[in-house]
Image (tube, helix red, strand yellow):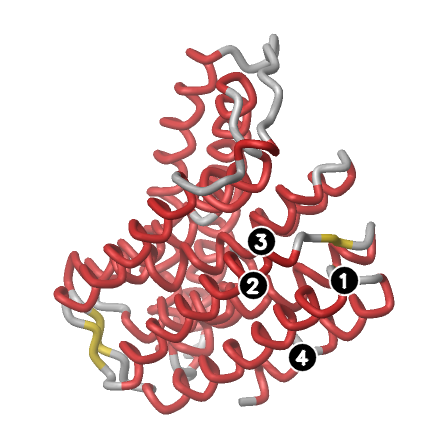
């Protein structure tokens, strides 16, 4: 009977973690759905939509998690969360989507988005290595992301513009309303996830960094689902742009915004550095695969999925 109290508390925290994750995913899905509807009606380039608008929208769970982590001082959790999310996207995400349909991307775009992703991850890794991400460093990461967006918005992707389509199911006013609702849901989900994940990590006696790696996979689901749907609809550019773009958004903007609010202290900096190094290594391999072969075949997709497994062994 003496263990009933702690066990009940752990069960309650676990339920709230799962609930927070579910609310995050649902809120992120609705936000992205509305954002894509607006983009289609306005008319934007397909790769630009995937690499910026959809990537930012599908990263709303990570952004919200980083914001709450900054407010509550959960540096280890959010760093593990972002690394887990980014690693799963570039390996598991690319692999699963490519199994559905081989992915193709022009070499020029691979250079832009691939290089942007690796640089973004490298900047985050440098900031994490010291064990402390200050407000100033956070501001630098955010500015680096805004610089990437500026380059993309003034790029030469106009030839791939999306045809303006009127969406009777998502008129502009309704789409804007759903974006606001989505953000509200994400805010609630982020609060539940961060607060209860920290409590659960303490109760289980495991580093919150490890728990962050696991939940990072959970919040990667929106990107994988969006990319899979895009491939199913013959919109491969949006699929690749979403997965690559999210891996630029999260290491720079998500971590940066959270650090601006309160700074991050990372107690397990060595473990984070090792996992971050692996994240950069596998990302480089996948980018090289795209660059050298023009895409990812179904056979190569199995290799990408296999690259995800060592994430938890470091």
For the residue carrying disc 3, how many other residues have a C-alpha within 10 Å: few (<14), some (14-19), or many (20+)?
A: some
Question: CA separation, marks 1 and 2?
Answer: 21 Å
The residues tagged by marks 4 and 1 sit, at their Cα atoms, a distance apart of 19 Å
- In the rendering, at what x and y percent does residue 77 appear? 36, 71
| Comes first in the chain, label 1 or label 2 | 2
Tell me, for residue 296, which label it has, or none: 1
Q: Does residue 78 sit above or below 145 in this rendering?
A: below
Label 2: state its secondary structure. Answer: helix
- Mark sitting earlier along the chain (4/3): 3
* Residue 146, position as x, y percentages in the image: 29, 49
What residue did someone put label 2 on? 217
- Is disc 1 surrounded by few (<14), some (14 to 19) or many (20+) residues within 10 Å? many
| Comes first in the chain, label 3 or label 1 | 3
Picture quadrant where residue 167 is located = top right
Cα–Cα span, label 4 and label 3: 28 Å
Mark number displayed over residue 109: 3
Cα gap from disc 3 to disc 1, whole angstroms = 14 Å
């Amino acid at each position: 009977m003496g263990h009933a109290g702690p066990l009940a508390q752990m069960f309650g925290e676990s339920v709230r973690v799962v609930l927070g994750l579910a609310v995050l995913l649902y809120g992120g899905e609705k936000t992205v759905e509305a954002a894509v509807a607006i983009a289609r009606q306005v008319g934007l380039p397909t790769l630009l939509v995937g690499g910026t608008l959809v990537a930012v929208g599908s990263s709303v769970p990570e952004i919200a998690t980083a914001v709450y982590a900054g407010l509550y001082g959960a540096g280890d959790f959010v760093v593990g969360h972002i690394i887990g999310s980014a690693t799963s996207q570039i390996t598991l995400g690319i692999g699963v989507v490519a199994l559905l349909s081989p992915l193709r991307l022009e070499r020029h775009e691979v250079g832009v988005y691939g290089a942007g992703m690796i640089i973004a991850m490298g900047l985050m890794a440098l900031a994490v290595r010291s064990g402390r991400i200050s407000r100033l460093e956070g501001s630098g990461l955010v500015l680096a992301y805004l610089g990437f967006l500026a380059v993309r918005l003034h790029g030469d992707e106009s030839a791939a513009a999306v045809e303006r389509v009127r969406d009777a199911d998502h008129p502009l006013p309704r789409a804007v309303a759903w974006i606001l609702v989505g953000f509200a849901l994400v805010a609630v989900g982020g609060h539940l996830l961060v607060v209860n994940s920290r409590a659960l990590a303490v109760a289980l006696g495991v580093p919150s960094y490890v728990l962050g790696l696991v939940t990072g996979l959970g919040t990667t689901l929106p990107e994988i689902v969006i990319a899979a749907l895009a491939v199913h609809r013959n919109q491969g550019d949006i699929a690749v742009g979403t997965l690559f773009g999210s891996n630029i958004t999260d290491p720079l903007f998500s971590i940066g915004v959270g650090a601006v609010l309160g700074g991050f202290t990372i107690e397990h900096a060595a473990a984070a550095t090792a996992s971050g190094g692996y994240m950069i290594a596998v990302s480089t391999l996948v980018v090289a695969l795209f660059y050298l072969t023009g895409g990812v075949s179904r056979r190569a997709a199995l290799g990408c999925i296999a690259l995800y497994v060592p994430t938890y062994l470091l």
